[in-house]
């Protein structure tokens, strides 16, 4: 029981971080960024390259991964999202194609065999019979730090408030002197950075492989659809619902069924409450 | 020199012409009104001045040509806008809505917030409330307050009384008078109700089908029987 709680909390924190960047783009940029997983994959590989292949300090590896993710987000906004303005389907298709191209690029550079990331902090702790790695504890704690920092940024800074404003009323934001284009660009960069940070922790939790970007996207879609758009708290709560659901299903049933209940939850919520559990009615 | 001067302005929505050759000027500290029926082009005119709609013609602020500039530039240049539908941020608090208005005037936040609270004490009482839960009158106050947070020299107010109860209309009118009397603001309001407009404005422009069809002071316009019938209910 205690093991389920610990495992659930750890996995959920990680899921919340991964879903956060996806939620931002969905709420503010109004784009279902199906290529979000590319940031996660590239983040993991950049960290692997810098810290394991080049032997640089882990912190530099992490900062490098986040920087590359943010630059990818910026470029995606500049080269794809902005020129295709007003056509979400075209944006979604192009970004999905981009993710597949990124996957091929990763195969070309790193090969298609899976790679194991060394733990960020090595070691294991036993909590009432349950073995928990320091690695996942560190990943979860850092996820929480990043999520709290994001919350403070969005609630407490002029740029953060402008991001909320653009997500609620573009004209209202524009006549207040906010440039929605610039805010969108910043949002894409933050989303890319968050995705890459999530990628480092996700890869250290599972492993690095060129196909690793698919599962986190599905989890993110689930969390955002169930949680409802525009809510950091909603995202946080639903990340925990889904994280715990997966851990419980694996523990009492079978690991193969891990994602099935998540899918059922998405369909159920779409039918019963399309705006999500914590979402707002759109005006 | 007029503070703001609009010269032969035309605007199009697709192929439909919304404004044709509109010219007007407003002196420093003056309050003028644009009067016209629904669809006459009043909101479009204000959107044009704010840089939200592409136009031909010229808009000058203090003699400087600002035609074609983006809304962000207009706000920094000193134009504040309270649009007809308010365009508030429904799931943000009153205070956060006002703070977004201060996006370009961050050093003046304390001063402007105090001024807004003085004009609208109710906004100070309800600063933690989400605007989606507020009445039409309260939203109008937040909208005007948000525009004032950018330290404007000129305020554009689109149909400030539409859909509001008479008591609230009187309250809003009182505040608009104080804006010009106490803060020295230049104000352009649009109205369907010419009598209300006259209680605030020194001069009127009558807009019909995107054209300015008459302009002048209240006394001048009242002499025109046709106009008096259409707009003053005389």
Image: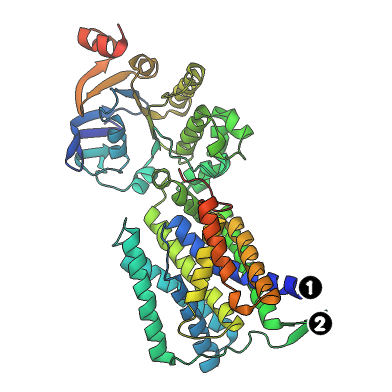
Check disc 1: other Cα within 10 Å, few if <14, some if 14-19, many if 20+.
few
Q: Is residue B62 visible?
A: no
- For the residue pair B111 and A201, the one nearer the viewer reads as A201
Number of on-image labels: 2
Residue A123 appears in view: yes
Quadrant of the image containing the N terminus of chain A? bottom right
Q: Residue at x 29, y 20 (%)?
A: B204
Q: Quadrant of residue A71?
A: bottom left
Residue designated by label 2: A129
Q: Is residue A200 above or below residue A75?
A: below
Q: Position of residue A86 (x, y in %)?
A: 32, 55
Q: Horizontal placement of B110 versus B143: left or right?
A: right
Q: Chain of mark 1?
A: A
Could you tell me residue A94's position as x and y percent? 33, 69
- Which is more toward the observer, A59 or B38? B38
Callout 1 touching callout 2 (CB < 8 Å): yes
Closest to the observer: B156 or A257? A257
Residue drawn where x is 30% and y is 19% of the image: B203
- Secondary structure state at the residue bearing disc 2: loop
Circle 1 residue: A2
Report the side of A2 relative to B16 (left or right). Answer: right
Alpha carbon distance from label 1 to label 2: 9 Å
Q: Would you place residue A7 above or below residue A231 in this image?
A: below
Seen in the picture, residue A11 relative to A23 is either above or below; the reply is below
Chain letter for the residue marked with disc 2 in the picture: A
Q: Name which residue lies at 42% across and 65% down.
A: A33
Looking at the image, is B196 positioned above or below residue B141?
Answer: above
How many C-alpha atoms fall within 10 Å of the one at disc 2: few (<14), some, or many (≥20)?
Answer: few
Q: Residue at x 44, y 91 (%)?
A: A112
Residue B26: x percent and y percent? 29, 28
Q: Quadrant of the C terminus of chain A?
A: top left
Q: Where is residue A45 drawn, in percent x and y?
A: 49, 84
């Amino acid at each position: 029981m205690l093991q389920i709680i610990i495992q659930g909390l750890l996995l959920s924190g990680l899921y919340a971080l991964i879903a956060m960047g996806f939620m931002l783009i969905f709420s503010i940029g109004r784009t279902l960024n199906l290529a979000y997983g590319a940031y996660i994959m590239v983040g993991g590989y950049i960290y692997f390259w810098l810290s394991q292949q080049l032997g640089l300090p882990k912190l530099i590896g992490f900062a490098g991964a986040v920087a590359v993710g943010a630059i990818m987000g910026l470029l995606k906004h500049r080269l794809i999202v902005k020129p295709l303005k007003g056509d979400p389907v075209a944006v979604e298709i192009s970004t999905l194609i981009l993710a597949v191209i990124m996957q091929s690029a990763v195969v070309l550079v790193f090969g298609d065999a899976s790679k194991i990331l060394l733990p960020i902090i090595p070691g294991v702790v036993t909590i009432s019979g349950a073995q928990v790695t320091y690695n996942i504890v560190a990943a979860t704690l850092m996820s929480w730090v990043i999520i709290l920092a994001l919350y403070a940024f969005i609630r407490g800074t002029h740029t953060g408030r402008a991001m909320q404003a653009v997500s609620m009323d573009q004209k209202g934001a524009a006549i207040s002197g906010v440039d929605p284009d610039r805010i969108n660009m910043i949002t894409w960069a933050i989303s890319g950075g968050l995705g890459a940070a999530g990628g480092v922790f996700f890869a250290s939790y599972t492993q690095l492989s060129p196909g690793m970007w698919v599962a986190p996207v599905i989890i993110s879609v689930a969390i955002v659809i169930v949680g409802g758009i525009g809510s950091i708290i909603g995202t946080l709560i639903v990340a925990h619902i889904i994280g715990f659901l997966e851990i419980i299903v694996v523990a009492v049933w079978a690991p193969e069924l891990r994602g099935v209940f998540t899918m059922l939850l998405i369909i159920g919520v779409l039918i019963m409450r399309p705006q999500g559990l914590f979402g707002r009615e759109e005006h | 020199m007029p503070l703001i001067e609009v010269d032969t302005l035309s605007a199009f929505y697709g192929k439909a012409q919304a404004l044709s050759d509109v010219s007007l000027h407003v002196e420093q500290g003056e309050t003028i009104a644009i009067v016209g029926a629904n669809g006459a082009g009043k909101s479009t005119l204000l959107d044009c001045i704010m840089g939200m709609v592409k136009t031909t013609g010229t808009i000058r602020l203090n003699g400087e040509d600002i035609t074609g500039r983006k809304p962000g530039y207009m706000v920094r240049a000193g134009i504040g806008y309270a649009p007809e539908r308010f365009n508030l941020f429904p799931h943000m608090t009153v205070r956060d809505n006002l703070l977004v208005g201060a996006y370009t005037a961050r050093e003046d936040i304390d001063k402007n917030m105090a001024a807004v609270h003085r004009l609208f004490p109710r906004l100070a009482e309800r600063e933690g409330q989400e605007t989606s839960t507020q009445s039409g009158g309260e939203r109008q106050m937040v909208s005007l307050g948000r525009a004032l947070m950018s330290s404007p020299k000129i305020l554009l107010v689109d149909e400030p009384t539409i859909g509001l109860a008479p008591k609230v209309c009187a309250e809003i009118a009182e505040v608009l008078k104080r804006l010009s009397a106490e803060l020295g603001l230049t104000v352009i309001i649009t109205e369907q109700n010419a009598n209300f407009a006259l209680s605030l404005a020194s001069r009127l422009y009558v807009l019909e089908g995107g054209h300015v069809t008459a302009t002048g002071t209240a006394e001048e316009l009242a002499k025109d029987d046709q106009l008096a019938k259409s707009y003053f209910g005389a």
